[in-house]
Amino acid sequence: MAETVTTCAVGLQHYLALGSILFAIGIFGVLTRRNIIGILMSVELMFNAANINLVAFNRFVHGGDLWGQGFAIFVITLAAAEAVVGLALVLAIYRTMKTTYVEKMNLLKG
């Protein structure tokens, strides 16, 4: 008996759907997390969703160019710098307030 083999071509819409789902999960994490480290991780997830979209658009719109990968590397560099600065701020806040929960941080009060 002959079996039929089905192939599934992954197109631009699949990558965009994946990117939008990851971005939505990141937004959900930013809005619902109480711990500042969880919020930073959700922001990183949003950056990665944007990278998927950049690379996918580059692949399907301008196949031979490397602009999408270049922008993705730039975004990864910015995300690394954001993570370093964010974690330094978290350490400074933790040393003074002894907590990483956002609702317990009221820095503007004197």
Image (cartoon, helix red, strand yellow):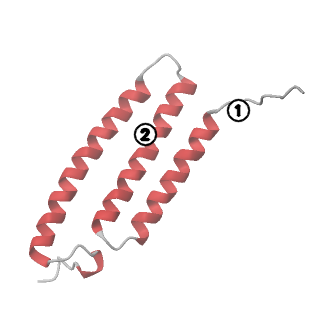
Residue that sits furthest to the front in the current view: 1
Residue 40 at what x, y percent from top left? Answer: 31, 59
Q: Secondary structure beneath disc 1?
A: loop
User: Residue at 62% across / 40% down in the picture?
Assistant: 14
40 relative to 10 in the view: left or right? left
In 3D space, how far apart are the residues under numbered discs 2 and 1 (Cα atoms)? 23 Å
Residue at far top of view = 64
Q: Characterize the local packing of mark 2: few (<14), some (14-19) or many (20 or more) Cα atoms within 10 angstroms.
A: many
Image-based side of 105 in relation to 25, left or right: left
Contact flag, marks 2 and 1 (Cβ < 8 Å): no
Instruction: Give the quarter of the figure containing the N terminus.
Output: top right
- Mark 2 — residue? 51
Comes first in the chain, label 2 or label 1: 1
Left or right: residue 25 compared with residue 103: right
> Residue 17, percent across and down?
60, 46
- The amino acid type found where label 1 is placed reads Cys
Mark linked to residue 8: 1
Please give the name of the residue rendered at 36% of the width and 28% of the height, measured from the top-left corner: 70
Residue at image coords 57%, 42%: 16
Above or below, comparing residue 14 to residue 22 in the picture: above
